[in-house]
Image (cartoon, grey):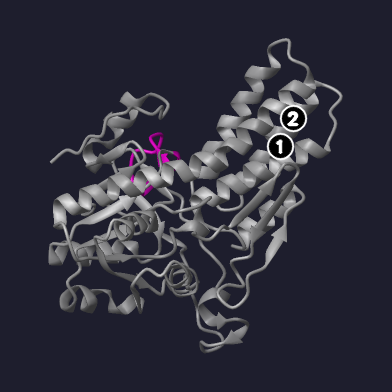
Amino acid sequence: MSLESIHYKTGSLKILNQRLLPTKSVYEEIHTIQDAWDAIKTMMVRGAPAIAIVGALTLAVELIKQQFESKTKLSEFVETSLTHLKTARPTAVNMTEAANRLIKLVEVLCQNSMSVEIIKERIIEECEAMLKKDVADNKSMGQHGAKVIINQCGNDNLHVMTHCNTGSLATAGYGTAIGVIRALHEIGKLEHAYCTETRPYNQGSRLTAYEMVHDKIPATLIADSAVAMTMKTKPISAVVVGADRVVANGDTANKIGTYQMAIVAKHFGIPFFVVSPSTSIDLHIPSGEDIVIEERSHDELTKMKGHQIAAPGIGCWNPAFDVTPAELITGGIVTEHGVFKPEVLKKEMEELGSYNIRKKTKFEN
């Protein structure tokens, strides 16, 4: 049984405080939109899919508690709440995608003869459905990713490297890139996983390592600076990473350090895969040059658990993400719909039409 980062029942939302892991497992109750904004901004909850789900479920909790005197008041509350949530961490597109979709839904529902209460119920249902859909999509990505890695890298004794945390703690359950590792492990094809520490916030050492140990997946933790040496000396079959935003040309924003891993993988001829739900694909942005990169506090670099570890007064630059160019994503982009080469992703997504599921998997060789 994989870990759960989100506990929800009608009218109640609790999230696993990931700032306290791996030493403490504490679930914090989220009551308001501002609670959710704070939890996202401070990385109490993180991972692009989980951010969107927590934002949407918080809206559901608020709607259950509140009464609205008119459709206009309801619509204004939904739009104001979701617009605020989009500002918490702007690089990850999932919250924006969910917000825009829910705002559009409210606009459409308010144009018909439904009562305010019926509209509220419909919005709440849509928010709650995101939880189950995310797990289903993750398992689908896991299956697609495992299949393509086996096809490209061999059938047995696979060694897979990953970066940051893309598992149950970053999603509603199972995970994206770690979901692929889980799928390989479940069918007996994974020999070993390697996870980076992921400085400066240590999502790899604190969270991914925690998931590997919890699920009894054979794994080794390495320093970020050991990636090249590991690829040179260990039989790494493939690299799988997640995505906070994939744009039209296939460029991908992910946790800082991803770009250099892709460069090293290209040097050693190791297939590099991005695992991304369609909600992380943003076809409105033409290339990675146009992605807004979040910059975070200097304290994340200079302190650890409140203790100063760097020379006081040193200048810092702390981007949370970098952009991996499409040409370095040599294995493909794994989605819930199948696996695609970056150069055909836009065409394939447009053919899917609003990301509706098409029961056909394509992989362009």
* Image height of 91 relative to 99, above or below: below
Circle 2 sits on which residue?
A: 76
Which residues are the magenta region? 279-290
Tell me, yes or no, whether the highlighted magenta stretch contains residue 112. Answer: no
In this rendering, does residue 178 appear at all? yes
Please report the residue visible at 33 percent of the width from the left and 54 percent of the height from the top: 183
Q: Which of 356 and 38 lies nearest the eye of the viewer?
A: 356
Q: Quadrant of residue 193?
A: bottom left
* Image height of 113 relative to 192, above or below: above
Q: How many marks?
A: 2
Residue 189 point in image, percent of width and height:
24, 60
Residue 28 point in image, percent of width and height:
71, 61
- Image quadrant where one finds the C terminus: top left
Please report the residue visible at 34 percent of the width from the left and 38 percent of the height from the top: 286
Q: Which of 27 and 119 lies nearest the eye of the viewer?
A: 27
Q: Which mark is residue 80?
A: 1
From the viewer's perspective, is 107 left or right of 212?
Answer: right
